[in-house]
Image (cartoon, helix red, strand yellow):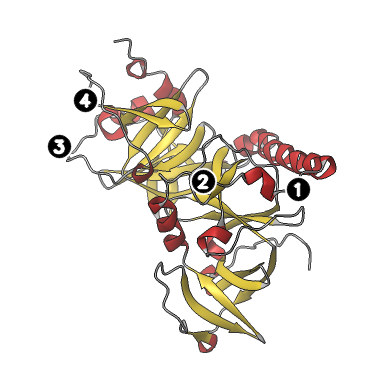
Amino acid sequence: MSDIIKIESTQNNENYCLIFSLDNKFYGINVENVLEIIKVPKLDVPQKMPKNILGLITYNNISVKIIDIYSILSYKKCNYSLDSQVIIIKTEEAIFGIIVDKAVDVRQLKSQNIQPLPYHSEDNLVQYIYRLDDIFVSIIDLNSVQNVIQKTQFETSTTDVTELFPQDQKSTSIMEKRQFDLIKKFESSIEQIYYDIEQYVIFTLSKNLYSLPIQNIREIVNLKNVSIVSLPSKYNYIEGIINLRGDFISVYNFEKFLKIDKGKKEKTSSGMLIVLELKDFKIALLVDEIIDITTIRPNEVIRKFDNKFESKYVVSEIHYNNKIISVISTDKLIADERLYIKD
């Protein structure tokens, strides 16, 4: 078996599990949540890191948190090696990575081999035990992992993360090259993505489906993980600002900005922020929910030339799960002078 397992799409991915090892124990996650498996690169480590976070990597032009799965599963701190692997994971709410010793195999799960937990799990991190031949695999609940991260997001890590990785010059150079190659991998494919395929983030506003091309999207943030500071403004679509790892970013209520407000809503902590990195600044668009990140080919895009709202912001439509989704043009969006508030 190769060092890097390629996850192929199947018609029934929910029945397949990626098995990996941690400290000579075996764990599994649903294959449909796995985007890619890579060898560990150099991580970007800000000065103050939340507990259970090892650092950040840039993946597909999005800043992705690398979670300390050892700590979450109550293992003692370990030292990672050049052979350690990062599993890039996508859930309904986020994209993040975990570092494991090795991705071992992909197996189809059989109900007769599922066993209940022999112990009580307070955080429900492990859903059940799966018997595979002569080994036992703990199947991880990724939603519970995210819950632990949210609970500890305001706790500062006391660990010097850099000491967990190889420190010699040769190893450092190898990890730096992997980091560089990972960034270049997506940068060099921009033209191909533009002409051959393109990725879209699909989201909801007032229960309606919309999408944005992914090129200018820096990251997607759960509103529960940040605090919006309200600012006095005569514009009802300005929610305030957030501090995202030292960057102060204006937050726009996208529903109100697009003038598709279906009535007054109470402010809640639910919602998602789509952070756009433009030429001279960053903005965050507040939407109700992120549905998916999907890939669409040019022949699947329908150009639109209607009037009203569509003529100003929507240039095309895509088909997704037998539904038609309006594609909002980033170019037309950033050309709107209402983004550039002077007072």
Q: Nearer the viewer, residue 30 or 320?
A: 30
| Position of residue 83 in the picture relative to residue 92 (left or right) | right
Of pointers 3 and 2, the one earlier in the residue sequence: 2
First reached walking from the N terminus: tag 4 or tag 2: 2
Q: Please, what is the three-letter code of the amino acid marked with disc 1?
A: Pro
Task: Give the residue type at disc 3.
Answer: Lys
- Judged from this view, the residue extending furthest toward the left is 264
Q: Residues within 10 Å of mark 2 (few under 14, many from 20)?
A: some
Q: What's the CA distance linking mark 1 and mark 3?
A: 54 Å
Mark 1 crowd level (few <14, some 14–19, many ≥20, 10 Å Cα): some
Report x, y in % for residue 303: 45, 35
| Residue identified by numbered label 3 | 264
Measure the C-alpha gap from mark 3 to mark 4. 11 Å
Mark 1 near mark 3, Cβ–Cβ under 8 Å? Answer: no
Q: Do the residues under discs 3 and 4 have CB atoms within 8 angstroms?
A: no
Q: What residue is disc 1 on?
A: 166
Identify the residue position indicated by label 2 in the image: 157
Q: Look at the numbered disc 4 and give the secondary structure of its residue.
A: loop
Q: Residue furthest top?
A: 342
* Residue for badge 4: 236
Q: Could you say whether the residue bearing mark 2 is in a helix, strand or loop?
A: loop
The residue shown at (75%, 54%) is 81
The amino acid type, in three-letter code, at marker 4 is Asn
Between marks 2 and 1, how big is the CA–CA gap? Answer: 20 Å
